Image: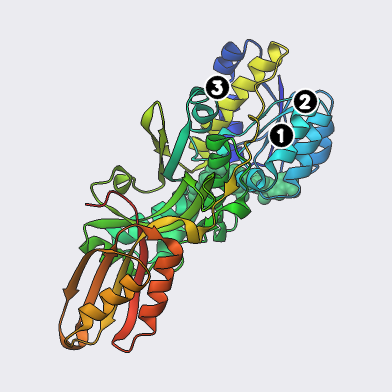
Amino acid sequence: MKVAVLGCGSVGSQVVRLLGEQADDLAARVGAPVELAGVAVRRLDAAREVDVPTELLTTDAAALVARDDIDLVIEVIGGIEPARSLILGAPEGGASVVTANKALLAEDGPTLFEAAEKAGRDLYYEAAVAGAIPILRPLRESLAGDKVTRVLGIVNGTTNFILDKMDTSGAGFADALEEAQALGYAEADPTADVEGFDAAAKAAILASLAFHSRVTAADVHREGIADVTAGDVRSARDMGSVVKLLAIAELRTGADGEEAVSVRVHPAMIPRSHPLASVREAYNAVFVESEAAGQLMFYGPGAGGSPTASAVLGDLVTVARNHRQGTRGMGESAYADRAVLPMGETLTRYHVAIDVADRAGVLAAVAQAFAEHGVSIQTVRQEGRGDDAQLVVVSHEATDAALAATVEQLRNMEIVREVTSVMRVEGTEE
Ligand SMILES: NC(=O)C1=CN([C@@H]2O[C@H](COP(=O)(O)OP(=O)(O)OC[C@H]3O[C@@H](n4cnc5c(N)ncnc54)[C@H](OP(=O)(O)O)[C@@H]3O)[C@@H](O)[C@H]2O)C=CC1
Ligand SMILES: N[C@@H](CC=O)C(=O)O
């Protein structure tokens, strides 16, 4: 089994290391030696976390993929191009593909699956979602006989690391991000993490598999953590909650009465008693709810070179075994034709902190604003007096559009000095 590794950064270097260190075990599991045949990089002279024999290094990834002795291409370059062309080129040349590239899969997955299928080759991508956690195989295979109704999780290690540091050590956003980058968790451009693009790509992949539907990154409502302030984190703490960046994919009934898919990524407050609240540092966790199985939880390291390489090598063994048996794994399941629900129609809950003028009737006026949009209030409490007076409101579930309109109205009220924090709330309504 001859393997070409494209990219030798955080993930690729660990794939190369494991291919060397586990060579005997891999050969035993596959039933044939697994040989590293080449490693494509951008810079030949860059310092690497692993020693790669000079004769295996190349900057010509396309030529490596086109070699007719390559059985498997592992793509860990990332981004859209040249990754897409290389992944499309591999099956044409007779090789299967393992990739960790969620950005590309969420943008153009079906094109890649079709190319692999047409050529009778495998395309596996367990590492693309939640690092080392086996979550895609369970969704695709173990739960294939069940009906998944909801997937809820923390799927970005970098943002979880940042929010955790802000909560526990009072670290500033920039310092926490720098630490996450040094640890190899962040994407080449950390905007993808911070602005929620990475989590949105993973949410699209999860939703596609969970609901057998075609969901792309563009279908996902996305908000990152760049606007989460120390005040929001403090506000959450005062409520006995934490702020997490959540990816939520669920089946809901649309306005037309048809089953639709709702997929979103946004920061949310969750109670400290919620299992997701205890997911620390760069760990990820994914809850899956299905009709027959009930609730399942998957937890583990969601980012970093070595954990991600573990998932890549798991796929390698599967592909190699298929290859030895002259077969290929099941392709993606047929796509159900489900609409994607607009965010405005999605049911959510809000936590709103409002600096108000401390005078009679304030509470009634604020409650009236919520009522006018059909949003009922779960709890409201007043903090401080005089110039420091603040109302903290937590709503019951309502459409996101109604909640957003309520906040807009609050911002325009004369008695409201400032709406200081608006955040969605997840977890049981107590
Ligand atoms: N880091 C993580 O925790 C995780 C990453 N992933 C995914 O894994 C993939 C790789 O991520 P990561 O290892 O962090 O990325 P890095 O930025 O650390 O590494 C990228 C590698 O690709 C090489 N490269 C870039 N452009 C080219 C090119 N045109 N031809 C050949 N090689 C090229 C770079 O070469 P050079 O070193 O010479 O610059 C580098 O070795 C991405 O898709 C990412 O989303 C998935 C899960 C977790
Ligand atoms: N940048 C990503 C890496 C893994 O997918 C993250 O932080 O989760």
Q: Nearer the viewer, residue 74 or 182?
A: 74
Residue type pointed to by label 3: Gln
Residue type pointed to by label 1: Phe
Rounded to the nearest whole Å, what is the CA distance between mark 1 and mark 3?
29 Å
Task: State if disc 2 and disc 3 touch (CB < 8 Å).
Answer: no
Question: 378 left or right of 308?
Answer: left
How many residues crowd around disc 2 within 10 Å: few (fewer than 14), some, or many (20 or more)?
many
Q: Quadrant of the N terminus?
A: top right
Image point 66% across, 12% down: which residue? 32
Q: Give the foreground label among 3 and 2.
A: 2
Q: Nearer the viewer, residue 161 or 121?
A: 121
Place of residue 169 in the rendered image (x, y in percent of width and height, measured from the top left) = 28, 60
- In the rendered image, the vertical position of residue 281 relative to residue 229, given as above or below: above
Q: Which mark is residue 70?
A: 2
Q: Quadrant of residue 229?
A: bottom left
Place of residue 334 in the rendered image (x, y in percent of width and height, measured from the top left) = 65, 31
Q: Which mark is residue 22?
A: 3
Task: State if disc 2 and disc 1 touch (CB < 8 Å).
Answer: no
Question: 170 left or right of 324?
Answer: left
Q: Quadrant of residue 66?
A: top right
Identify the element where label 3 is drawn: loop
Image point 48% across, 54% down: which residue? 265
Circle nearer the N terminus (3, 2): 3
